[in-house]
Image: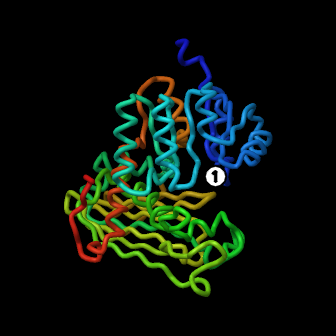
Amino acid sequence: MTAASRRRVRVLVLGTGSMAANHARLFASDPRVHVVAAADVDAARASAFASKHGIEKSFGTLEDALSWGQFDAATNVTPDAVHYPTTMKIIAAGKHVLCEKPLAENFALADEMAAAADKAAIVNMVNLSYRNVAALQKAQKLIAAGEIGEVRHVEASYRQSWLVGKHWGNWRTEPMWLWRLSEQHGSKGVLGDVGIHILDFTTFAIGMMPTSLQARVKTFAKAEGNRIGDYLLDANDSASMQVEFENGALGVIHASRFMTGYGNVLKLDVFGTEGAIEINHGLEWTEIRMCSGEDVHTQAWRRVQADPVPTIHAGFIDAVLNGENGQPSFRRGAELQAILDQCFSPEATHATPVRVQA
């Protein structure tokens, strides 16, 4: 074991809202990591978060944390609209960074972040957390190995229903949900929140990105005047993409917060010339099935065993310690953002080529 592999990576948690606890827990559970500080624009919240998670230092600004500087890497758990300005400062300070998704509000900013991180030669990764799903990693390997032949058709969906049920609380009264419904508060709606997950889930599994797409996004009336307090409810609630991939395969990728009966479920079906793979993934369960070989003649499906895989957080620490960037990188985040950007374009109601340059 080298000296580098024995040292503990010192991590700063930037942003101490609802998602930050999971980051702190995952890093703290890794013996190679020492979570040394927390920072938030709300100094009192940062202090309370640090106390709760046994973190020694807390700061009321990122600038104060950078001035202190006694950390190797940061995990950026700030709101979507804040990812770009804060991450660029972290990069400029030469610190490694794991950033929450989406990487930025648009491709131009995400592209700038990826270029800056590469130039600074720092480890840069996006927390596309469903890469942690063992079934997804297993499906990717099976498809890449040709077990279902050549991909011909794909169906994928991210299903939520917290706008219908109260299983996660009352969205009408809780800021942690209301901000997700308001572009003015930095939200890109269901497309930016979870659509990016199902887009990554799908394209990682099949090893191809869309070359053209047709998309629709929809915002439904949910309150009088489409407003609750300071929150204008103008972000999209449902989104659908019809896509063509580089080998000519067709696909439908969609996400909605109105899929009643599904709390948080990702579904992916990949159909090939010699078989098919199906993934169903919920918060506490996963199922992967396959129909291939002689079974294609009887439509028989069999369950597939998928071994556990490391988390993105563990992969990030691996990358910091070995000096080689991990996946998904900022460049991957930027490529996904280019596709999301096109879904918001008026041209997207007609099939258009996918553009990956600003």
Please state the horizontal and vertical placement of residue 69, each as a whole percent of the image: 60, 27
Residue most extreme to the bottom: 224
Residue at image point 33% right, 73% down: 215
Residue holding disc 1: 19
Answer left or right for 268 relative to 13.
left
Answer left or right for 212 relative to 191.
left
The answer to whether any part of residue 25 appears in the image is: no
Front position in the image: 194 or 285: 194
Front position in the image: 176 or 262: 176
The answer to whether any part of residue 123 appears in the image is: yes
- Location of residue 352 by image quarter: bottom left
Circle 1: element type: loop
Q: Amino acid at mark 1?
A: Met
Answer left or right for 216 relative to 130.
left
Q: Looking at the image, how many numbered discs can be counted on the residues?
A: 1
Q: Quadrant of the N terminus?
A: top right
Front position in the image: 243 or 144: 243
Residue at image point 54% right, 18% down: 5
Front position in the image: 67 or 84: 67
Please state the horizontal and vertical placement of residue 10, each as a whole percent of the image: 62, 27
Residue at image point 48% right, 57% down: 288
Q: Quadrant of the C terminus?
A: bottom left
